Image (spheres, helix red, strand yellow):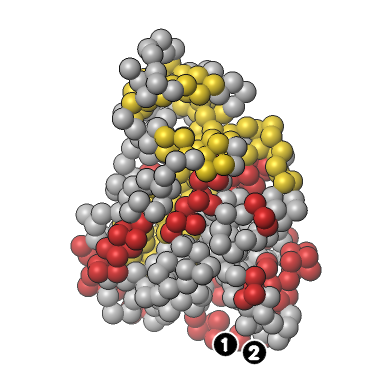
């Protein structure tokens, strides 16, 4: 007898939608097709689309250190309400996750507290390069995170020699926050106190492309994998489109949904993030990348801060916004608007993350794979409100906006964890296997 059958849905299999039932036992996909076996539980997915469990490859859940803003438990609740079944979580915590003791502590903190599955980044520092060579078999380690420009936290590796050492010694994909620290410091004089419109002026596109050129040069020199996070500029799109193979990159839903100066006019410091949201010429080029499959992933860069901090006078206001709960509704709405296809989104949030980072048994609906599913209703219209946000920060840059298309079921290891926005069961997420 099966544990669960998902019947009558359009299932995303082999890059197309097929009217196949899916049979699940012991957390695994056992049968795909017409299923006549009996089951303890059945989901009628008529009118719904059954996707592989979607993966958000960039989240900041703030634990340890800033748990008043977010923690692993609350962040995972936001993830599953948004249809995300697995997350990669960042190391710029306090203390940072930059040694094996702190890494193990993160795993211990996550156990039986996270609803979704999880991988953690190991933070690179100027003096831990020697530790980066033996992370290949470290349980739950999705990759190495490198900040070459300062952002939230104190994990900064700014000097070229130190960056070279990180790549030279890396045994995993190196995911990079790519802004040039020297240029950031030189341009600080352009910050206008109280005017967040000066944020993209300070952290300009030269700051981004200069850093990204250097990262690609170093990664190619050592034949290592680099994944450039939250790419924001047309210059980077043009450059990165010429450097494929070991170089991959991400775009965020925020940068595909807002542009300057409108976002700063409407949201003020709530629109502040690093790298910044830029003008429409950059926005248009990011969409060009998406439509032509130049980027590899879409990650939320979920980076919550409390309202009282976001409302401080710029530049005392911190950069970052929540996004793990809204990644899928925002992108499904873009599909409904004809801006990208479902197949493209599946590449960005399922298949490419699994391939680039080597996640075992995730990203596809295949027999023998883990029974993680994001079940979506492409016709359901939802209104995102601050009150509906599961994150402890209790706000969203999309507050008050309606989106067509949303996850209605989140299934992890064959267990229904979210139905129509309601969280079910216990937090039983597991470390991802790489």
Few, some or many residues within 10 Å of mark 1 (<14, 14–19, 20+): few
| Image: 168 above or below 115 | below
Task: Give coordinates of residue 273: x percent, y percent.
Answer: 60, 69
Few, some or many residues within 10 Å of mark 2 (<14, 14–19, 20+): few
Q: Considering the numbered disc 1 on the image, is that residue within a helix, a strand or a loop?
A: helix
The residue depicted at 53 percent of the width and 52 percent of the height is: 78
Which quadrant of the structure image shows residue 268?
bottom right
The residue depicted at 30 percent of the width and 59 percent of the height is: 108
Task: Give coordinates of residue 355: x percent, y percent.
Answer: 38, 44
**Along the line of sight, the residue nearer the viewer: 252 or 106:** 106
Q: Tell me whether circle 1 and circle 2 mark residues in contact (CB < 8 Å).
A: yes
Which quadrant, please, contains the N terminus? top left
Q: Which mark is residue 186?
A: 1
Q: Residue furthest bottom?
A: 189
Marks 1 and 2, Cα distance to the nearest angstrom?
7 Å
Query: Does residue 241 appear in this view?
Result: no
**Along the line of sight, the residue nearer the viewer: 341 or 95:** 95
Task: Give coordinates of residue 384: x percent, y percent.
Answer: 69, 50
Q: Residue furthest front?
A: 425
| Image: 211 above or below 80 | below
Which quadrant of the structure image shows residue 97?
bottom left
Q: Considering the numbered disc 2 on the image, is that residue within a helix, a strand or a loop?
A: helix
Residue, disc 2 = 189
């Amino acid at each position: 007898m099966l544990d669960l059958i998902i019947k009558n849905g359009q299932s995303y299999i082999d890059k197309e939608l097929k009217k196949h039932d899916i049979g699940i036992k012991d957390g695994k996909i056992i049968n795909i097709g017409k299923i006549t076996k009996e089951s303890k539980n059945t989901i009628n997915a008529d009118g719904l689309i059954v996707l592989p469990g979607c993966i958000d490859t960039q989240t900041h859940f703030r634990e340890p250190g800033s748990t008043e803003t977010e923690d692993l438990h609350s962040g995972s609740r936001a993830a599953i309400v948004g249809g995300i079944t697995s997350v990669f979580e960042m190391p710029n915590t306090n203390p940072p996750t930059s040694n094996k003791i702190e890494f193990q502590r993160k795993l211990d903190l996550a156990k039986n507290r996270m609803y979704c599955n999880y991988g953690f980044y190991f933070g690179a520092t100027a003096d831990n390069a020697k530790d980066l060579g033996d992370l290949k078999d470290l349980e739950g380690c999705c990759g190495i995170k490198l900040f070459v420009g300062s952002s939230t936290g104190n994990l900064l590796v700014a000097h070229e020699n130190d960056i070279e050492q990180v790549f030279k010694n890396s045994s995993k994909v190196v995911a990079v926050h790519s802004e040039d620290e020297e240029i950031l410091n030189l341009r600080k004089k352009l910050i206008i106190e109280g005017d967040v419109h000066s944020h993209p002026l300070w952290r300009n596109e030269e700051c981004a492309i200069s850093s990204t050129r250097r990262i690609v040069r170093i990664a190619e020199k050592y034949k290592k994998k680099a994944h450039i996070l939250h790419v924001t500029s047309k210059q980077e799109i043009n450059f990165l489109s010429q450097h494929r193979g070991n170089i991959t990159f991400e775009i965020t839903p925020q940068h595909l949904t807002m542009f300057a100066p409108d976002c700063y006019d409407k949201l003020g410091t709530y629109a502040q993030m690093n790298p910044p949201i830029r003008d429409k010429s950059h926005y248009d080029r990011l969409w060009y990348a998406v439509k032509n499959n130049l980027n590899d992933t879409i990650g939320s860069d979920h980076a919550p801060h409390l309202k009282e901090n976001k409302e401080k006078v710029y530049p005392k206001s911190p950069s970052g916004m929540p996004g793990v709960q809204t990644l899928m509704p925002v992108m499904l709405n873009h599909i409904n608007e004809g801006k990208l296809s479902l197949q493209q989104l599946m590449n960005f949030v399922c298949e490419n993350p699994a391939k680039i980072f080597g996640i075992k048994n995730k990203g596809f609906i295949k027999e023998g794979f883990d029974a993680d599913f994001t079940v979506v209703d492409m016709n359901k219209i939802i209104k995102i409100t601050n009150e509906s946000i599961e994150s402890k920060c209790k706000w969203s840059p999309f507050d008050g906006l309606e989106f067509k298309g949303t996850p209605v079921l989140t299934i992890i290891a064959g267990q229904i964890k979210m139905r129509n926005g309601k969280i079910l069961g216990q937090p039983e997420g597991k470390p991802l296997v790489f």
